[in-house]
Image (cartoon, rainbow, N blue to C red):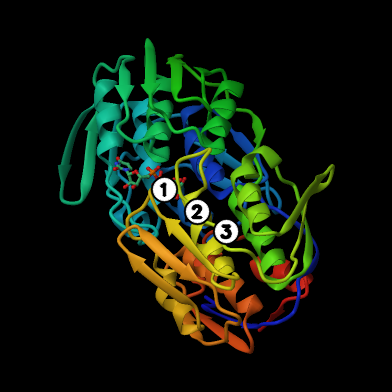
């Protein structure tokens, strides 16, 4: 697999780019499809390597999947039971494989889920997922790197999440959708991807109310009917191209977006002096030269997304002054800092806080993508840097950005 991305910086990016379906919605909706009987068709599914890994896991436990075209995917679970155990070899590549916990429990009352891998952005425990499924009647034990869960007599219940975890909220929704009685999630995650999951399940006959608020109520139903559903656009991919316009001093129309999902990013970009306008085709972003510094705090939605923090850091590393970035969601999400410094950035990290002293210019260097969004921040920095940047381990970037090379090239980036 190609694993190095070489970018010649300095060209302003201009034109239009169409955003793909949301990675984080697509992964959970594909998994949730096993809760229904029969063939589900999902449209607007991004063909990224995280999706390919997930499909391998599903195929391994007995689910048939088939691409109908570039973005429509057919998912067909068998009439009988699925293999309960996910393979460690496959699951370690993809953190989202942990979503099989709730889906398998909802479908057949049993799951053996490997403790997951994925981006190395700090400790990613599963205590809240486990607390949730236990409240709904699952017995859980952890052994040899696996979660063994079994629900003999599941029943609806009330779960309070200490932190509004996206994955835990999704797992509980999926199990509760087919668990008899009413379940209530308090302090639930409010991300748009949660709303998409609830809308999808409701389109198949589930009874979920309150998704998008911090209290979600689910009346379990006996069965769900498979159907067809289109996934929301990827707000993080959209935000990344918006920053590409700002950092390169170009003008990009970002198409296929839901503007409300992007409000936290738009607000911060406007504070930097970047021009952002909505029209009926999407969002237009115009870079205006060196940006103003701004302070950022990542928070659960509708706060500023942790998944956009690294990309914003790349932009602020060339601001006219100093910015403070506080990372409140993940503990180890400043991994691009050392790589950005290799390109001339001036950033100091103390615990959860990074102080970014803007510099006049970045210069090309050999750098390494340590995780998906850190990789995206290096791409952005490379677009603005003088000379050539060689990004190693670019496979991390392809995990989450569909056709990034084609999309950037069509905007005028010089890629090798
Ligand atoms: C999802 C997204 C990821 C995004 C993140 C936060 C997917 C596939 N991934 O990840 O891109 O960055 O939401 O928006 O949708 N936590 C616990 N105990 C738990 C679960 C989580 O303490 O049982 C903590 C985590 O360590 C982390 C925080 O909660 O500090 C947020 O994690 P969570 O919202 O669960 O993120 P993911 O669902 O893993």
Point out residue 102 in the picture as x, y percentages from the top left corner: 36, 32
Looking at the rendering, which quadrant does residue 274 occupy?
bottom right
Circle 3 Cα neighbour tier, 10 Å, few/some/many (<14 / 14–19 / ≥20):
some
| Residue depicted at 45% across the width and 79% down the height | 341
Q: Nearer the viewer, residue 169 or 355?
A: 355
Residue 358 in the image: above or below residue 173: below
Q: Earlier in the sequence, mark 3 or mark 2?
A: 3
Residue annotated with mark 2: 296
Observer-side mark, 2 or 1, equals 2
Q: Is residue 101 left or right of residue 222?
A: left
| Residue depicted at 44% across the width and 21% down the height | 215
Point out residue 148 in the picture as x, y percentages from the top left corner: 22, 38
Q: Earlier in the sequence, mark 2 or mark 1?
A: 1
| Residue depicted at 39% across the width and 11% down the height | 182
Evaluate if marks 2 and 1 touch, with contact meaning CB atoms under 8 Å apart.
no
Observer-side mark, 3 or 2, equals 2
Tell me how far mark 1 sits from mark 3, CA to CA.
Answer: 14 Å
So how many labels did they put on this image? Answer: 3
Residue annotated with mark 1: 96
Q: Earlier in the sequence, mark 1 or mark 3?
A: 3
Point out residue 337 in the picture as x, y percentages from the top left corner: 42, 72
Quadrant position of ligand 1? top left
Residue annotated with mark 3: 48
């Amino acid at each position: 697999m190609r694993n190095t991305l070489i970018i010649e910086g300095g060209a302003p990016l201009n034109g239009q780019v169409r955003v793909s379906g949301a990675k984080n919605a697509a992964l959970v909706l594909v998994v949730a499809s096993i809760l229904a009987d029969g063939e589900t068709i999902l449209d607007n599914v991004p063909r990224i390597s995280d999706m390919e890994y997930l499909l391998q896991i599903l195929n391994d436990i007995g689910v048939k999947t088939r691409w109908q075209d570039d973005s429509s995917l057919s998912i067909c679970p068998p009439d009988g039971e699925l293999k309960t155990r996910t393979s460690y070899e496959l699951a370690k590549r993809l953190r989202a494989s942990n979503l099989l916990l709730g889906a398998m429990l909802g479908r057949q009352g049993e799951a053996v889920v490997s403790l997951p891998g994925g981006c190395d952005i700090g400790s990613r425990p599963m205590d809240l997922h486990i607390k949730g499924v236990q409240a709904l009647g699952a017995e859980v034990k952890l052994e040899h790197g696996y979660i063994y869960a079994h629900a003999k007599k599941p029943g609806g219940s009330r779960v309070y999440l200490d932190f509004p975890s996206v994955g835990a909220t999704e797992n509980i929704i999926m199990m509760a959708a087919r668990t008899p009685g009413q379940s209530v999630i308090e302090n639930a995650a409010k991300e748009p991807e949660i709303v998409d999951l609830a809308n999808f399940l409701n389109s198949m006959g589930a009874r979920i109310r309150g998704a998008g608020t911090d209290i979600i109520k689910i009346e379990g139903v006996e069965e769900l009917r498979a159907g067809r559903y289109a996934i929301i656009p990827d707000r993080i991919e959209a935000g990344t191209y918006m920053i590409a316009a700002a950092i390169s001093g170009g003008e990009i129309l970002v198409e296929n977006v839901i503007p409300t999902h992007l409000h936290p990013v738009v607000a911060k970009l406007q504070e930097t002096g970047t021009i952002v306008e909505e029209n009926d085709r999407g969002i237009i972003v115009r870079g205006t030269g060196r940006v103003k510094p701004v302070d950022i705090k990542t928070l659960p939605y509708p706060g500023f997304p942790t998944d956009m923090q690294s990309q914003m850091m790349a932009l602020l590393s060339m601001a006219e002054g100093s910015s403070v970035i506080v990372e409140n969601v993940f503990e180890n999400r400043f991994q691009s800092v050392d790589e950005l410094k290799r390109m001339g950035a001036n950033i100091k990290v103390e615990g959860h806080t990074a102080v970014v002293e803007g510099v006049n210019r970045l210069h090309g260097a050999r750098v390494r993508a340590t995780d998906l969004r850190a990789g995206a921040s290096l791409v952005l920095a490379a677009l603005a840097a003088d000379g050539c940047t060689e990004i190693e381990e670019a496979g991390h970037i392809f995990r989450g950005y569909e056709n990034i090379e084609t999309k950037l090239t069509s905007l005028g980036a010089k890629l090798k």
